[in-house]
Image (spheres, grey):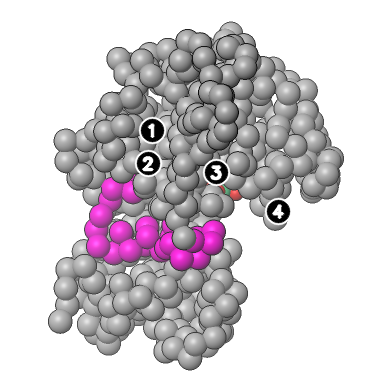
Amino acid sequence: MKTIDKPNVVIVIFGATGDLSKRKLFPSIYRLYQSGKIGKDFAVIGLARRPWTNDIFREKVCESVQVADQEKENDLQAFASHFYYQPFDVTDTSSYNHLNTLLHELEGHYETDGNRIFYLAMAPEYFGSIAKEIEQNGLKDGAGWTRLVIEKPFGHDFESAKELNSQIRLAFDEDQIYRIDHYLGKEMVQNIEVIRFANGIFEHLWNNRFISNIQVTSSEKLGVEDRARYYDRSGATRDMVQNHMLQMVALLAMEPPIKLTPDEIRSEKVKVLRAMRNVEHEQVDDYFVRGQYGPGSLGKGYREEAPELENSTTETYVAGKVMIDNYRWAGVPFYIRTGKKMKEKSIKIVVEFKDIPMNLYYKHRAEKHPNLLVINIQPNEGITLHLNAKKAGVGSIAQPIQLSYTHSSIDGINTPEAYEKLIYDCIIGDTTNFTHWDEVAYSWKFVDAVLDAWSKKEPNFPNYPAGSMGPEAANRLLEKDGFHWWPILD
Ligand code: BG6
């Protein structure tokens, strides 16, 4: 029997020979298949320019699942038999006509009720025209629902994002558009809301009277790998801050929604993004620091990674102070930082509570050990509360202690991978963990101001060695406010 949480569907992937399909999409669909979250009646159509056949495609799908999950089970062949390939030219109408025929065939074969997902996992310059062709060639006119999934980047700045959005909106309604921000699929990012709103001890203190600052770090050891062309046009601000970092800030700062519906949650997030203080040109250095890695313990500098990067002024690191000018957060800095080729791979949030005025239990009364709530997103998943307690033995000396809760997971192996959750959400029509246009728009406006100010001044790059925690100036950003970055590893 078909149930609402397991609808049958045909997923059409544009860019099926690409890295994202191989690394994330195929293994995620496999896990949904294995855990029974996707009906047995499903099909995937892979589209790309290469002249592959169904057999080649299926082989690649099996390989990618094996690599991702070290999967050896024999249901792989059965799984892969649901995959079909069509060589595709996104600019050629006849490709869309063939796709239409194939869709109808597969819908008959698998009885998928006409439900269709079009997943755009390819170069963004084609997003608008593909959406238009899908509409004009009747591919949206199936018997069931149709959804469009769009990978980032969603535009290059506010204006281009707006243009792209209006192109897509000519063909699809907002509620049919699923803009991916894969951080919103991460277990512990989804947990932010629950930790906040399901615990009185946190929520009552979650404001400017009790919190001194919040630090959000997403550091990577990887460099640009083979994405130099994309990355050099993008840089860390567009690649990470406009989307992932600001989404985490929004979740940390939003008011409790009146209901757990996508619209209610989104409207609270949007209010936060609207309240972010705009960074004026002349103040950019007070709020943001940019960096680019040079040679260091993790190898070459950015400019040596590829010939075209030789004179690049693209930032591979950003640290920033985001001020949210509303009643709850006035005066509390949200510090964010993200970068490539940093010392550790870590995604972590540290909420620093205001300290008591003087500590009687430390030798030096000025010694401060403020309480911290640390939300570990990756590689470990869990939360740690930093408190002070009596040191065992004689006297009343305090020592910092930690209460920890760790998800029993090894870096995302047991918890569902972000993409797995997001694909599933799209199949069941839950838009909560996708970004609405309003969020995208406000985030772009905020980062555009920073990028615009930077564009007026040549940066002094490189300014941090590969394998470090970023440029010195990022430390000063906090020091001048009387704070410091908490270590990313406990
Ligand atoms: C992507 C960026 O959105 O996120 C990449 O384009 C970055 O440059 C990646 O490496 C980081 O994701 P995660 O899940 O490894 O933190």
Q: Is residue 228 visible?
A: no
Who's the residue at 69% across and 50% down the image?
Answer: 222
Span shown in magenta: 409-435
How many tags in the picture? Answer: 4
Query: Residue at image x 43%, y 62%?
Result: 415
Q: Are marks 3 and 4 in contact (CB under 8 Å)?
A: no
Q: Amino acid at mark 4?
A: Glu
Q: Position of residue 289 (x, y in %)?
A: 64, 23
* Residue denoted by label 4: 225
Mark 3 surroundings: few (<14), some (14-19) or many (≥20) residues within 10 A = many
Kind of residue at badge 3: Ile
What numbered label is drawn on residue 192?
2
Per the image, the residue denoted by label 3 is 347
* x then y, percent, for residue 464: 77, 32
- State which mark lies toward you, 3 or 4: 3
Q: Is residue 423 magenta?
A: yes
The CA distance from mark 1 to mark 4 is 31 Å
Circle 3 SS class: strand
Dot 3 beta carbon under 8 Å from ligand 1:
yes
Using residue 373 as the reference point, say whether residue 480 is left or right of it: right
Between the C-alphas of marks 2 and 3, the distance is: 13 Å
Magenta-drawn stretch contains 215: no
Q: CA distance from mark 3 to mark 1?
A: 14 Å
Distance Cα–Cα, label 3 vs label 4: 20 Å
